[in-house]
């Protein structure tokens, strides 16, 4: 095994497999809005993607979230939401701090009310999602199936992964672009954490949010180059 690793060393991707700005712009328009009246499918896949991007969590962690009062709490004025995994959750990596970690998602500023960015607010999306699913919820899991005989029941990690990939692909399609190939749900961790780091978040804060015990995990496996080259700015001016 050591010899094979020397012959074919691990080479993690250094560029994103999809463009975050394209996806976010796609999520702000039709058919993803208005969230109060879009189909339950579109509301679900959009909300799952927004929470995945803003929390930096893997799909297994998102599946562990619950609507139980002890696991989810909206702050007054919907300025933020506190999320915790259900007590019996066993994470993929037992040593991960997420098992006892509180996830805090902050809402966009009230000054942005009515702006396009409001359609990307994870707190607002979650509030609308929770209110709409309450009518037919059959599980205390936060994200549940939205159609068919399984409507309202707990969703699997595999199905949530499909939702994330479908949301990314659909966001490209509504922009008139070809869906990127080879997109995986786990890529949201790399794209979101790299963007947060590029925007000024410290390595420690990124690792704490994602649940990585060491900065080397982020640097070695998840760090992507999300910068724009100067030449690109010239041609797009």
Image (cartoon, rainbow, N blue to C red):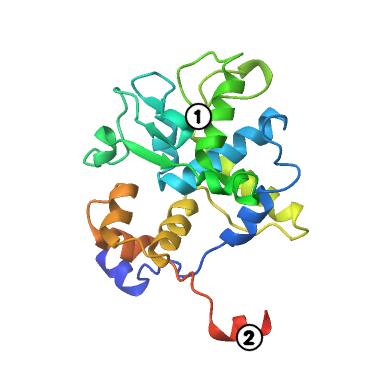
Q: In which quarter of the image is the N terminus?
A: bottom left
57 on left or right of 123: left
Q: How crowded is mark 1: few (under 14 residues within 10 Å), some or many (20 or more)?
A: some
Q: Quadrant of the C terminus?
A: bottom right
Q: Which mark is residue 156?
A: 1
48 on left or right of 38: left
The percent position of residue 102, horizontal first and vertical second, equals 31, 35
Q: Which of marks 2 and 1 is nearer the N terminus?
A: 1
Task: Identify the image quadrant of residue 70.
Answer: top left
Q: Which mark is residue 234?
A: 2
Q: Distance between the residues labelled 2 and 1?
A: 46 Å
Q: Which residue is drawn at 48% across and 26% down?
A: 142
Q: Residue at x 48, y 44 (%)?
A: 52
Task: Identify the image quadrant of residue 225.
Answer: bottom left
Q: Residues within 10 Å of mark 2 (few under 14, many from 20)?
A: few
Q: Which mark is residue 122?
A: none
- Relative vertical location of residue 144 with respect to residue 107 in this rendering, above or below: above
């Amino acid at each position: 095994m050591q010899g094979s690793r020397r012959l074919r060393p691990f080479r993690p991707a250094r560029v994103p497999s999809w463009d975050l700005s394209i996806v976010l712009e796609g999520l702000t328009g039709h058919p993803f809005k208005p969230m109060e009246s879009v189909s339950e499918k579109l509301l679900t896949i959009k909300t799952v993607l927004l929470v995945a991007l803003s929390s930096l969590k893997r799909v297994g962690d998102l599946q562990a979230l619950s609507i139980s009062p002890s696991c989810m709490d909206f702050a007054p004025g919907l300025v933020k939401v506190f999320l915790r995994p259900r007590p019996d959750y066993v994470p993929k990596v037992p040593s991960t701090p997420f098992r006892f970690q509180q996830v805090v998602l902050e809402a966009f500023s009230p000054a942005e009310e009515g702006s396009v960015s409001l359609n990307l607010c994870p707190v607002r999306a979650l509030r609308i999602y929770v209110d709409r699913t309450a009518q037919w919820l059959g599980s205390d899991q936060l994200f549940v199936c939205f159609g068919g005989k399984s409507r309202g029941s707990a969703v699997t990690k595999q199905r949530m992964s499909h939702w994330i990939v479908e949301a990314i692909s659909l966001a490209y399609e509504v922009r008139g672009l070809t869906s990127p190939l080879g997109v995986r749900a786990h890529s949201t961790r790399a794209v979101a954490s790299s963007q947060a780091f590029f925007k000024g978040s410290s390595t420690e804060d990124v690792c704490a949010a994602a649940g990585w015990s060491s900065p080397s995990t982020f640097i070695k496996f998840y760090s992507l180059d999300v910068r724009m080259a100067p030449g690109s700015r010239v041609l797009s001016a």
